[in-house]
Each structure stands twice: as structure tokens, then as C-alpha cells.
Amino acid sequence: MKYWLMKSEPDAFSIDDLAARPGKREHWDGVRNYQARNFMREMKKGDTVLFYHSSCAKPGVVGVAKIVREAYPDSTALDPESDYYDPKSDPDNPRWFMVDIQFQKKYKQPVSLAAMKANPLLDGMRLLKRGNRLSVMPVEAEEFQIIRAMAAE
């Protein structure tokens, strides 16, 4: 099993939105960065996801989800009405993919970006590296356990 971090702006799609979906599950669409897309194609059913709220007053990890469906073509890339439409997409040779995630838990207290930056045990975490703005990225097992402990599960 691998661990991942997936960012979403809470005004667009929050952990509460995920928890409110039928079956507490939703597809993760709209990723338009090749490296993030490649990470999504590595995801396996059962992998654990840290759900991260970004571009908000207090960015941070707000809960946990699981991968419940592995990568498949992102239909929003072919939909001219979608914000994520890509006119260069080809249904016979998909460029963009999505996965399905399922809500597992919301942290009582989010683990803020500031708290993660202040924790020397997380110095090597990809999220905290200068210039890393990917919306999907791998997380080391040890990093996941540290964040879980910081959340006081």
C-alpha cells in the first residue's frame, strides 16, 4: 500500500463534500499536470490519501480517504462545457485520468501547513519542498504516521 496527498480548494470540493456524496465516494477529476497525472496512474485500490485543503485561510490536512477505483480516462477533458476541457484530448488515446476516492475520516483538528513546516520530522516531505505546487503527490509511510499523530487520531 502507498500513501498520497491530494489537494483541493475547500470552496470547490471539501472533505465535507466528499463525506456527503452517495457512498461517501467521488471521482477526482480535472488534474491537468503531467506529473500529478502520472502519480494518479500509480495509485492502487486500497491506497490511503491525505485530504488537503489548499488556497484557504488555513491550508492543511483535514482528513483521510482511500483509493477505491484506479485510474481511468477523465471524461471532463472531452466535455466542452467543463472547466477542465482539453481540446487536444483524444478518446482513443486519453491524456488525462482520474481516480475514485472514498471518505474515511475527518480530523477533529486539521494539521495545518504551518504545523507541518514546524515539525523537523517532516523536513523531507515533498509538500513542504520549495516550489512544489502539485495537487497530487506521494507521501512516505513515516510522513503519513507523523501527520496522523499530529492530528491526534
Image: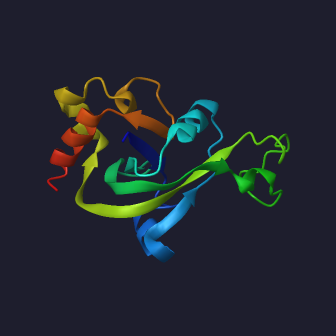
Above or below, 109 against 140 in this view is below
Quarter of the picture holding the N terminus:
top left
Task: Locate residue 11, reporting x and y percent.
Answer: 50, 61
Task: Locate residue 92, reporting x and y percent.
Answer: 84, 45
**Residue at x 83%, y 56% (from the top left corner):** 80
**Residue at x 83%, y 48% (from the top left corner):** 91
Specify whether 144 is left or right of 119.
right
Which quadrant of the figure has residue 14? bottom left
User: Toward the viewer: 40 or 136?
Assistant: 40
Task: Locate residue 10, reporting x and y percent.
Answer: 46, 59
Above or below, 3 against 109 in this view is above
User: Toward the viewer: 10 or 145?
Assistant: 145
Q: Is residue 35 visible?
A: yes
**Residue at x 18%, y 26% (from the top left corner):** 120
**Residue at x 76%, y 42% (from the top left corner):** 94
Specify whether 153 is left or right of 92.
left
Counting every numbered tag in the picture gives: 0
Quarter of the picture holding the C terminus:
bottom left
Specify whether 128 is left or right of 114.
right
Task: Identify the colour scheme used.
Answer: rainbow
Task: Locate residue 115, reporting x and y percent.
Answer: 22, 40
Q: Is residue 12 visible?
A: no
